[in-house]
Image: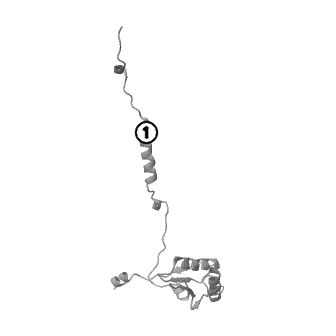
């Protein structure tokens, strides 16, 4: 009787399941960690400004927000810092002229919420020409001279 060696006839097989698992994990890792460029989606047309002050700025309604978050409309202080009190003070100073441009000036240390509250009150009253005043950087001014 002849005894065959079964080990010699077994063919080696490759188990691909772990390889597929590793590839899928790598694909998921790369998809999750990929940063998407959102700048290409949003197209902005930025406004342009000239260096010369316009005539409308001289008659603009001035809204000043100091570092403490208190509001001054032209030379009149709003008694409280809530939106309704601010709207009432703006209405008393500006009257019914909603086409009048508004110049919003805020201290650099002013809380952001105070500026948003002023813009919210102006928007609720119907003012649409709101400009935010800024000062040039001291280094830029010195370099220009």
Residue at image mark 1: 20
Q: Is residue 41 above or below residue 46?
A: above
Q: Quadrant of residue 61?
A: bottom right
The image shows residue 29 at horizontal and vertical percentages of 43, 49
Residue at image coords 49%, 73%: 47
Q: Quadrant of the N terminus?
A: top left
- Pick the residue in front: 93 or 8: 8
Q: Is residue 124 left or right of residue 11?
A: right
Q: Judging from the image, what secondary structure is the residue with disc 1 in?
A: helix
Q: Residues within 10 Å of mark 1 (few under 14, many from 20)?
A: few
Q: Quadrant of the C terminus?
A: bottom left
Q: Is residue 115 above or below residue 21?
A: below
Q: Is residue 16 above or below residue 3?
A: below
Q: Is residue 17 left or right of residue 73?
A: left
Q: How is the image coloured?
A: one colour
Residue at image coords 33%, 82%: 143
Residue at image coords 42%, 42%: 23
Residue extending farthest to the bottom is 75
The image shows residue 123 at horizontal and vertical percentages of 61, 77
């Amino acid at each position: 009787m002849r005894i065959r060696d079964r080990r010699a006839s077994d063919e080696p097989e490759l188990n691909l399941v772990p390889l597929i698992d590793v590839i899928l994990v790598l694909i998921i890792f790369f998809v999750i960690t990929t940063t998407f460029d959102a700048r290409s989606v949003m197209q902005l047309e930025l406004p342009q400004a000239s260096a010369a002050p316009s005539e409308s700025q001289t008659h603009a309604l001035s809204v000043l927000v100091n570092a403490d978050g208190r509001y001054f409309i032209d030379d009149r202080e709003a008694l409280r810092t809530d939106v309704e009190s601010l709207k009432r003070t703006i209405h008393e100073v500006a009257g019914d002229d909603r086409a009048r441009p508004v110049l919003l000036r805020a201290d650099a240390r002013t809380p952001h919420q105070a500026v948003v509250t002023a813009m919210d009150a102006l928007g609720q009253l119907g003012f649409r020409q709101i400009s935010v005043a800024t000062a040039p950087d001291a280094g830029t001014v010195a370099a220009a001279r």
